[in-house]
Image: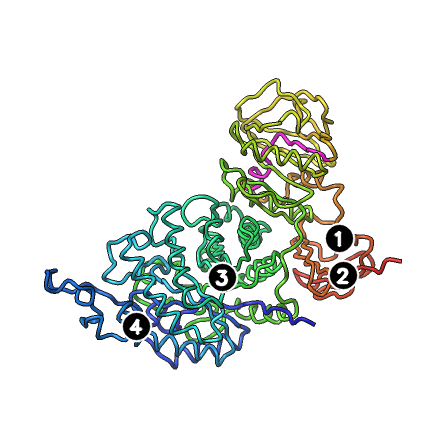
């Protein structure tokens, strides 16, 4: 039987005595004590950072340039010495810091820890660490800077590639923060240069992106990164991510932020994605007493969307440090799993508990998608994706995403959300979508003032009025009252469509139209956008639109709750796994099992007839397909 892939659980590591001055104040005994503590509490993976100006201390020769001393070896110095006198004359890599780095790798290996190495650590916690030679240059676009970066990385990889506990390389830490002036092409040229420098020396390890930002266009967008690296990464800090601090961090949507962003990156790119930096950002956001629940919710829902790892920011508190950024940025002081005196915080105790859970579950494959949401160019894609993901969760469905330019994901259900402008997505994609529907697919279109080709053919309705006016649509859907704030009104006359619901003005709210072998649903409100803007949207009836859309789609494991996340995973051993993450106040939930399946194994819950009794906020169930007679 194939051994389960180990889930990477741990933290980003700076030494407890020095934070990001770890290499300036290197203390082997501190590192040994740090990692021993982390191992004791279940940490199996750390991410470490060779601070750029410490490891590549290249500076310009202080003597004025002249024709006599203008060769590279004389122009650039390391500690006032010419490059040709260095062990690494091409890069200026510090031999002393390299040996310190190897010492940390050896200690990590002794503690059974896997390591992710982020090379260009020129940005960290709001502070820049740029080698003196490159200060004042755009280090993501300047050719001279890129050459020195590639030389540095080449020597680092060559020196470290034999360390078996290194499981991945990264270009660096959030390198997109090193310059906000580069365009999409410049950023791709930079990432290609860095990745190629790594792969020229080592092709055996995956390259992680080390960056974050929920964009599908522009510099360092997720699709661009996916073309060049093997694994994308999320840094889902709620304070810094749009729409993620509407409610407190124990709210359903806030707790699902990491899972949504990770699933979003992965599905739009076709690449795996890891949660490699996460925290609540200190007691000014969430008291330490309540961090364990946030860790549990965000971790276990991320497991459910197929991430391979989850790393906290960071290992130790940094409130005792008196240099930038810690003496200026108070958000950076209290983000650790343990205090600097080695007292574990409650969040570390929770990590230890969950590390045992993850040894049983392992890494789950990405869940089976019930629908693909097509994200147009002219909308706030992250806002719409967040709303669509949550609507799917509420009706027990997993949502995947694709960008409008990409090849259509194969699916029986598509959503074209919040159409805006008169050319919401390219007409050639509309024709392809129409063909899918004619062949039997189902489509939901939600409206926000725009138009699409083949609109009458798809919706089965004719437009006799179209207005840009703020108003509220009120209607009853599945016996529940629904109010939706809208900025656009569409007045429709049914042709071939069946009107399912009208609002209180007698205008179409939800319709259904048969097109070939498939069906098109049309909702005259931008429900995904409204969801993201609504305070505790899970307590509204917005999800009833998605429930109607998916009504005829079978569910392997259907829970009678709109506050329980259900994901279905096809395992390599032929079984089907179901993960439940419960946000319902009830701990006993009714469920229905699809015909042809039987329950084989249950963890962290109890099955009594058609009721699942949750012992934790999460449960893991394995199903077998019954033998057909």
What mark, if any, has residue 623 been given in the picture? 2
CA–CA distance in space, label 1 to label 3: 31 Å
Mark 2 and mark 1: span between their CA atoms? 9 Å
Secondary structure of the residue carrying numbered label 2: strand
Of 477 and 572, which appears nearest the observer?
A: 572
Marks 2 and 1 close (CB-CB < 8 Å): yes
Residue 252, image x, y percentages = 60, 51
Between residues 112 and 143, which one lies in front from this camera angle?
143
Do residues under tags 1 and 3 come within 8 Å of each other at their CB atoms? no
Label 1 or label 3, whichever comes before in sequence order: 3
Image coordinates of residue 519 in percent, x first then y, are 71, 34
SS at mark 1 in the image: loop
Query: Marks 2/4: CA distance?
Result: 54 Å
In three-dimensional space, the C-alpha distance between marks 3 and 4, rounded to whole angstroms, equals 25 Å
| Residue designated by label 3 | 276
Vertical placement of 78 versus 543: above or below?
Answer: below
Q: Is residue 263 above or below residue 489?
A: below
Residue displayed at 17% across by 67% down: 74
User: Circle 3 — which element?
Assistant: strand
Q: Earlier in the sequence, mark 3 or mark 4?
A: 4
Q: Dot 1 corresponds to which residue? A: 556
Q: Which residue position is annotated with label 4?
A: 24
């Amino acid at each position: 039987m194939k051994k389960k892939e180990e889930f990477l659980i741990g933290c980003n590591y700076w030494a407890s005595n020095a934070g990001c001055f770890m290499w300036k104040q290197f203390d082997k005994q501190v590192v040994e004590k740090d990692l021993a503590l982390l191992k004791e509490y279940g940490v199996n993976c750390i991410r470490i950072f060779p601070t750029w100006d410490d490891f590549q201390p290249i500076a310009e020769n202080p003597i004025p340039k002249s024709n006599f001393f203008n060769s590279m070896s004389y122009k650039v110095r390391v500690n006032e010495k010419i490059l040709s006198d260095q062990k690494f004359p091409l890069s200026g890599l510090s031999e002393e810091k390299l040996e310190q780095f190897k010492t940390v790798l050896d200690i990590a290996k002794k503690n059974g820890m896997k390591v992710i190495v982020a090379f260009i650590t020129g940005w960290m916690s709001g502070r820049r660490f740029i080698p003196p030679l490159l200060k004042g240059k755009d280090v993501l676009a300047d050719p001279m800077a890129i050459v020195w970066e590639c030389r540095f990385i080449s020597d680092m990889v060559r020196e470290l590639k034999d360390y078996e506990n290194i499981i991945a390389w990264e270009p660096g830490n959030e390198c997109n923060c090193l310059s906000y002036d580069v365009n999409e092409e410049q950023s791709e040229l930079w990432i290609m240069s860095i990745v190629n420098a790594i792969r020229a020396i080592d092709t055996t390890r995956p390259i992680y992106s080390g960056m974050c930002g929920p964009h599908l266009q522009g510099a360092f967008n997720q699709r661009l990164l996916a073309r060049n690296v093997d694994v994308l990464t999320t840094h889902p800090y709620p304070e810094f991510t749009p729409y993620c601090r509407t409610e407190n961090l124990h709210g359903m949507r806030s707790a699902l932020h990491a899972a949504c962003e990770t699933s979003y990156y992965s599905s739009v790119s076709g690449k795996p994605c890891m949660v490699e930096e996460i925290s609540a950002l200190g007691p000014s956001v969430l008291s330490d007493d309540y961090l364990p629940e946030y860790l549990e919710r965000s971790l276990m829902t991320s497991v459910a969307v197929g991430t391979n790892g989850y790393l906290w920011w960071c290992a130790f508190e940094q409130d005792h440090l008196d240099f930038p950024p810690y003496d200026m940025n108070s958000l950076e002081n209290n983000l650790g799993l343990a205090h600097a005196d080695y007292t574990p915080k409650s969040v570390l105790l929770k990590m230890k508990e969950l590390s045992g859970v993850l040894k049983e579950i392992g890494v789950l494959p990405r869940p089976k998608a019930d629908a693909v949401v097509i994200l147009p160019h002219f909308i706030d894609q992250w806002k719409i994706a967040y709303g669509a993901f949550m609507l799917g969760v509420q009706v027990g469905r997993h949502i995947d995403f694709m960008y409008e330019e990409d090849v259509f994901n194969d699916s029986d259900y598509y959503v074209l959300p919040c159409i805006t402008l008169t050319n919401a997505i390219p007409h050639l994609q509309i024709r392809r979508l129409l063909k899918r529907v004619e062949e039997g697919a189902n489509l939901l279109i939600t409206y926000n003032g725009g138009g699409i080709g083949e609109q009458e053919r798809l919706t089965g309705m004719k437009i006799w009025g179209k207005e840009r006016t703020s108003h509220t649509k009120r209607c009853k859907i599945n016996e529940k009252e629904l109010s939706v704030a809208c900025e656009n009104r569409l007045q429709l006359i049914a042709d071939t469509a069946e009107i399912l619901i009208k609002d209180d003005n007698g205008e179409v709210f939800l319709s259904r139209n048969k097109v070939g072998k498939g069906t098109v649903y049309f909702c005259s409100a931008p429900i995904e956008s409204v969801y993201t803007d609504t305070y505790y949207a899970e307590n509204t009836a917005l999800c009833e639109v998605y429930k109607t859309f998916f009504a005829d789609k079978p569910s392997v494991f259907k829970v009678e709750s709109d506050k329980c996340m259900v994901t279905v995973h096809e395992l390599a051993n032929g079984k089907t796994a179901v993960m439940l993450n419960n946000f319902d106040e009830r701990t006993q939930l009714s469920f229905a099992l699809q015909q042809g399946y039987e329950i084989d194994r249950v963890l962290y819950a109890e099955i009594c007839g058609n009721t699942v009794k949750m012992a934790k906020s999460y449960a893991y169930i394995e199903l077998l397909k019954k033998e057909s007679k």
